[in-house]
Image (cartoon, rainbow, N blue to C red):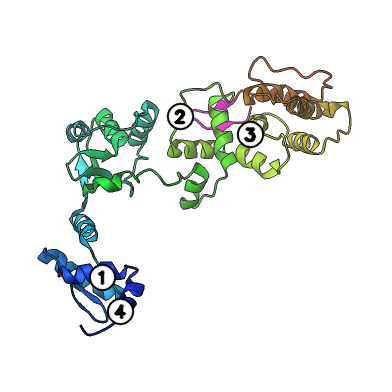
Amino acid sequence: MSGISFREASIRSELPVEELNRLTSSGHIKTIQNYFTILIDSDSLDTYLVNRVKPVVQQEMIVVGKKKRQELKHMVEIKHSFETITPEQAREYLATSKGNRPLSKERTAGYVRDLLTGHFHTSNDSIVFDTDGALRNGHHRLEAIVAYGLPIHDVSVMRNFPKEYVNVMDQGGKRNYQQLSFYDEENFSKQHFSISRILEFGVPGTHLGHSITYSENRDLVYKYLDAVSFVVKHSGHKKYLSTSILAVVARAYYSQSQERLLEFLDVFKTQMPTSKEDWGAQRLYTYIQTADLNGHRPKESEIYLRAESAVMHFCKRYPVVQLKAASRELFPLKLNSKGEVVAA
């Protein structure tokens, strides 16, 4: 046997000498030279290895055992395409599923709304079928196509996906809305998305069922962009200045003095009122701080209602002795015929 030694081959291939000896004896390895020549039963796979794999690895040692060859066969046979899927086909695909995590009606409804508004787009997250033809990924999107009732074009589909690879799906970190906006070149912060949701749906924690998609939340940011950008710009990083408080200030932006609102944020952050007229901001901070130090930080809904009362008293320059929660929305928003927010 010419070429490199078993010991060097073992080091360079990261395989035990005994394994190399076994592969050579069984005929899997024809010669050991500057690279291993692999004997494969399948001519197509042999051609793939010779023409594609060997040029890439160049002079590196390659040893492919039975298990590795089988994995490569699976990889070669995986089929990917972009397809038009009708509601009827979607039902047929769903019927092949052998079980899945519980479906979320809210997520399916979100996809349907995106379809209706033209926000639904294909992605690199394919509809996936395994080697038995069973559906393994894409259940919510297929349910949405059924509910939508019309064909969807250019849907990414993968077929003949190895079963042993399915268990790694959905294991990556999910991007939040702030990270997604980076790809849209908008760079909205987490606060932009959170505050706009509160402006649209009201008191945080009380609007259950309003699960919205990224596209819908992005539209809300644009709807309230002036007010949201105003509070985000001047919010800073002060403890206890939560999203709920910023949302109240953003609501007040459309009907109260912006200069006075900036003063409210400043007094809340510095805890330095200039007169009794500024007590609203100080009382709100004290309310949250006291409860937090006693181990019972208020819920965001409670903070929101007291923030409404504090901001209203502050803007009207009414001294506050005891801060109480608002019993109604103190800063209702007015919309024009186009659904745009207008100043009160």
Task: Name the residue that disc number 4 marks.
Answer: 59
Q: Position of residue 219 (x, y in %)?
A: 48, 38
Q: Residue at x 49, y 22 (%)?
A: 208
Q: Is residue 283 visible?
A: yes
* Of marks 2 and 1, the one in the foreground: 1
Q: Is residue 123 magenta?
A: no
Earlier residue among tags 2 and 3: 2
The C terminus sits in image quarter? top right
Name the amino acid, label 4.
Gln
Name the amino acid, label 2.
Ser
The alpha-carbon separation of the residues under discs 4 and 3 comes to 58 Å
* Of marks 3 and 1, the one in the foreground: 1
Earlier residue among tags 4 and 3: 4
Residue 127 placement: quadrant: top left
Circle 4 sits in a helix, a strand or a loop, which is it? loop
Task: Name the residue that disc number 3 marks.
Answer: 243
Magenta span main SS: loop
Name the amino acid, label 1.
Leu
Q: Is residue 155 visible?
A: no
Residue bounds of the magenta highlight: 333-343
